[in-house]
């Protein structure tokens, strides 16, 4: 099986030279031009891939998750800070929009992807398909 990573800036899929399914997740999230990246953790278990996005300051309503043509895309909308009385003497963070995309391998069940949002962490579980087990059948000769 050949894995590829999404490169939206170039408009095509690039071969994944790292060779592993997990590497596709780790190296496959490409940031769309002019959008901020967000930190992502990816963990593989026997049953699933678990992806966590650090989204401090975002609400779950600010985030959209989409799967289309075997590509998982997480998009966050820009958040405008509420103007408060007083003048900032220093302002270092903004909640800009972001987009991260990952090419899903054939071994996952896209229809069963689940997501949760708690304490600024978006958690997405991408379950793996059950491996096909070999069947042994005894056939009698007639």
Image: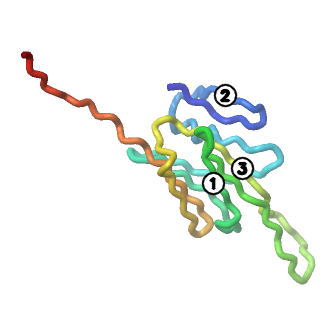
Residue designated by label 3? 99
Mark 3 Cα-neighbour bin, 10 Å: few <14, some 14–19, many ≥20 = many
10 Å crowding of disc 1: few (<14), some (14-19), many (20+): some
Q: Is residue 59 above or below residue 85?
A: above
Secondary structure of the residue carrying tag 1 is strand
Residue at the left extreme of this rendering: 142
Q: Which of marks 1 and 3 is nearer the N terminus?
A: 1
The structure residue drawn at horizontal position 83% and vertical position 68%, both measured from the top left corner, is 80
Q: Is residue 74 left or right of residue 44?
A: right
Q: Name the residue under label 1.
A: 65
Q: Which of 16 and 129 is in front in this view?
A: 129
Q: Residue furthest right?
A: 87
Q: Which residue lies furthest to the front in this view?
A: 142
Q: How crowded is mark 2: few (under 14 residues within 10 Å), some or many (20 or more)?
A: few
x and y, in percent, of residue 29 in the image: 65, 42
Can you give x and y, in whole percent of width and height, for residue 121 in the image?
59, 62
Disc 3 secondary structure class: strand
Tell me the quarter of the picture where residue 16 sits. Answer: top right
Q: Provide the residue designation for mark 2.
A: 14
């Amino acid at each position: 099986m050949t894995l590829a990573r999404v490169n939206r800036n170039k408009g095509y899929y690039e071969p994944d030279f790292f060779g592993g399914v997990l590497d596709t997740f780790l190296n496959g999230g490409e940031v769309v031009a002019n959008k901020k990246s967000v930190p992502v953790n990816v963990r593989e278990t026997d049953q699933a891939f678990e992806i966590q996005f650090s989204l401090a300051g975002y609400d779950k309503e600010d985030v959209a998750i989409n799967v289309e043509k075997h590509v998982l895309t997480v998009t966050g909308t820009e958040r405008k800070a509420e103007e408060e009385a007083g003048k900032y003497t220093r302002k270092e963070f903004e909640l800009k929009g972001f987009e991260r995309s990952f090419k899903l391998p054939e071994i996952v069940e896209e229809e069963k992807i689940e997501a949760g949002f708690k304490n600024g962490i978006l958690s997405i579980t991408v379950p793996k398909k059950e491996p096909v087990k070999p069947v042994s059948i005894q056939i009698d000769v007639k």
